[in-house]
Structures are given as structure tokens and as C-alpha cells.
Amino acid sequence: MDNHQKRNLTFLTIGLIFMLSGIEYAVILPTIWRYLQILEAPPYFLGLGLSAFSLSALLTGPLFGIWSDRSKTTKFIVLFSNLFEIIGNFMYFIGYSKWLLLCSRLVAGVGAGAGSSIFGLLTRSTRPEERAGIFAAIMACRQAGLLVGPAFNLFLRLCDFKLGPFVVNKYTSPGIFMCLLWVLLQFVVLGMYWDIPSISSEGGATVMEMKQEEVEEEVPLMGSDEEPVHTYRSVSSDQLETSISSEIQPVHRASDPFKNFSASREFLREEVVVVLTAQFITLFNQTALETMVTPLTQRYFNFGELGNSLMYSLCGVEVILGFFFVRWLSRKVADRAVLAAGLVICCTACIWCLVFLCNPRGANLPLSAFIIGVFLQLLGLPFVAVSQVSLFSKVTAEKTQGFSQGVRRSVGGLATILGPLWAGGLTNNLYIMLGMMLALLLMITVMTALSYDRLTEPRAVQSAQSSDSGG
């Protein structure tokens, strides 16, 4: 099997990993509140249970990233992290107490931390011009999982039997179901996932060929009878092959990627701050809106379980189509332009919601105005989500990409914790909630406009630095 086939199968497996994470969210979320009530948990345990997963992923993401940056391997990391998903979901299935249920989400969240290693692999094994498209496809896989997940709930809710000492019902069945899926995924990873070689952003194989040519040109000069005293290459043909292969080997094997690394120098640069801020605000607003939508549909349209499920399904279809549109668009337009377009759409959506959805007099809310508001909010999401991930991979160092992606995902995890907390207490004060969201969007839009010239891969700077060091 050649490297191209291994690469495609590895990307397919990564897509399955993200799809399973979406399915897990979709099958557990609808029943966790009732499950906690049966276990006599107080209401605040719902927030704790949902936040626990994000919290452990937030804390472990950078650690998995450092591990992958140092080892330059991700297959074992993925296999190891999936064990936490298996154990966590089995704990959820057992569910003897509310504390065990809370711990189950904490343990499962550790498995999600390996996403930083996966994004590091995707960055190192893709060229800059194709990266946004691949990121879009991977993110679409998670949305597909969110879309498919409710279909599994149709038969999981019919479960009512015993498995040894354990009761399998509509509340515990999501745990054992996801446990089995993650076990099956382990076999898929073993057979279809490879630690594919890195591709240099300067041309990949072309760089290797140039190095070979450079060595061949030096051979006649070093092939004289008197061998120079101060040489770093041997002149013999046997050792020449070793010299070439050693030069082609990635630099990371010869040095520690964190040897001269400075977190402040890496993450406090203008362009990195802008992208991380975009990550935080996007996920903060998204989770806040998700928290707001269900009470809003219940209050104004009397949507029940079926109505909300249908709404979420349609939203999932729109987001998936949006990701694939951005995948196509990223081949023709720069990432920073996609980000700017997404922010404009998000600002427009927030203004629309402020004008038409905020209803202090308690009058009926037009369904058409609600649909347009949700449509615009979801329309901008793929633009911002894909472009900021792709941009971040280009404005941060490739050799420490796993750790950097862990930091980015931790920032996003913090947003997913704070977003619902902000929106949960303001469902009756939409002007305040949406006003803050619009203020955040306007802030990141201004930041993007002021830093627009810096939101690009610093190729010229890298080339100049490499030529200076070569001289």
C-alpha cells in the first residue's frame, strides 16, 4: 500500500472519529437530564454533567499535543485516548449514582483531548492550500454524527432488558451503545490509521529532491585523494546514501521541538491573538444560541420533542452543506477572506435577531423571522469555524502544532462552558444576551480588519530566515 492510500485511509478514520464524537453528543444529550432526575440529582448537575466533558478535554488537549509533538506519532495516542471514551461511556451505562454519572463524562472528555494531536497530524501532513478543505470535511463529519445520532435514539429508547446485573433502558442504553462503537473504532484505527509522513509547507517531496541534488553536486568536490579534515559527510558511495536519507529525515528526530519554544512569543503575536479570539467568540455565541433556542421554541411555537428534533435535523443539514461549500470556496479564496465573510454574516444574523426576536411586549413571534434568524446564524458558522482553524495552523509553528492545537481547543472548550452559563440565565432577557453577543462579534470583526494583512502564512519571512541560516 503506497503513502497516498495510507493517507486517504487515515483521513477516513479521522472522519469516523469525529463522526462518533457527534453521535455521542446526540444520543446522550436528549436523555441525560431525565437520567439525572432518576438518580435524584439536583438541577445544577445538568450543567455540571455537560461542562465536565468540555473541562477534561480542555485540560488534556495541550498534554496530548505535547506528547504528539515530541513523539511525532499519533496512532498510539488515538488508541490510548479512545480507552477513556470506552471506560467513560461504560461508567455512564452503569450509572449507580449521580456522582458516577458526572465522573463518566469527565473520563470520556479525556478521550476528546486527543483531537489536538489529530489536528497536529492534519497540519503536518497537508499542504497549506488544501488544508482548509480537509478541515472542513472533518468538521462536516462531526455534524453528520449530530444529524445521525437522533436516529439511533429511535431504537435505543425501546431498550428494556437486563444485561447481567445491569439494567438496559432508554437512559442507560446510550452509554453501552457508545461504548461498543468506540470498541469497534479501535479495530478500525488498528487497521486503517497510519502515522503518515509530514509534508513540508515549502513543497514536500520537492525539498527532498533538492537536498539530494545538493549532495550529489558536492560529491566531486569531496571525492579527491585528500579528504578534507573538517567534513560532515563521507565521500564513499555507501555512506552517501546514509547521508542523503539522514538529511531527508525530519528535523524533529535530531532536536526537541520545544527546545527554543516560548509560549508568550508564540501565542501573544497579533495574528494568533486574533484567531484565538475568533475561536472563543464563535463557540461562545454558538453554545449560547443552542441554549436559547429550545426555551424560545417552547415559549412561542409550542415545539415538543418531535418539533425540536426536526428543527435540529434541518439545522444539521444546513451546517453540513455549509462546510462543503466552504471546502469548495477555500480552494479559490484566502482563509482570511472566508473569515471576514463569516464574521459579516454572523453580525448580520445577530442584528436580525436583536430586531425581530427580542420581544419585550410579549407579542407573538413570527415563525418566518425565527427561521431566517437561525438560518443566518448557521450560515456563518462554517465560514468562521473552518477559516480560523486553517489560519491558526498557518500562523503557528509546525513543529509544535499538536500543543498549539491543544491550546486552541482549550480556548474553545472554555467558550463552550461559559456560553451556556451566560445564556442560561438570560433566556428572558434576549436584548442583554444578544447585545453582548453582537458586541463580541463587532469586536472580533474590527480586530480582523485591523490585522487583515497579518492573517496569512508567513512564507516570505520563513524563506528569508532559512536562507540566512543556510548562509
Image (cartoon, rainbow, N blue to C red):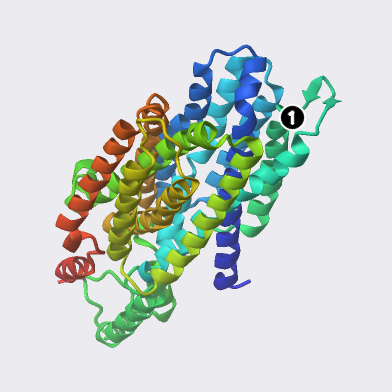
* Residue that badge 1 annotates: 170
Residue 360 drawn at (x, y percent): 35, 31
Say whether residue 72 is visible.
no
Which residue does the image show at 33% across and 56% down from the upper left?
345
User: Relative to 200, is 313 above or below?
Assistant: above
**Residue count near mark 1 (Cα–Cα under 10 Å), binned few <14, some 14–19, many ≥20:** some
Helix or strand or loop: what does disc 1 sit on?
A: loop
Which residue does the image show at 49% across and 43% down from the upper left?
114
- Residue 422 in which image quadrant: top left
User: In which quadrant of the rendered image does the C terminus lie?
Assistant: bottom left
Question: Count of labels shown?
Answer: 1
| Residue in the foreground of this view, choosing between 184 and 417 | 417
User: Relative to 222, is 239 above or below?
Assistant: above
Residue 383 drawn at (x, y percent): 38, 58
User: In which quadrant of the rendered image does the N terminus lie?
Assistant: bottom right
The answer to whether residue 316 is left or right of residue 441 is right
User: Relative to 247, is 414 above or below?
Assistant: above
User: Relative to 245, is 27 above or below?
Assistant: above
Which residue does the image show at 75% across and 36% down from the upper left?
156
Residue 201 drawn at (x, y percent): 34, 68
| Residue in the foreground of this view, choosing between 442 and 137 | 442
> Looking at the picture, which amino acid does disc 1 mark?
Lys
| Residue in the foreground of this view, choosing between 289 and 421 | 289
Which residue does the image show at 31% across and 34% down from the upper left?
431
- Residue 125 in which image quadrant: bottom left
| Residue in the foreground of this view, choosing between 65 and 331 | 331
Residue 213 drawn at (x, y percent): 33, 83
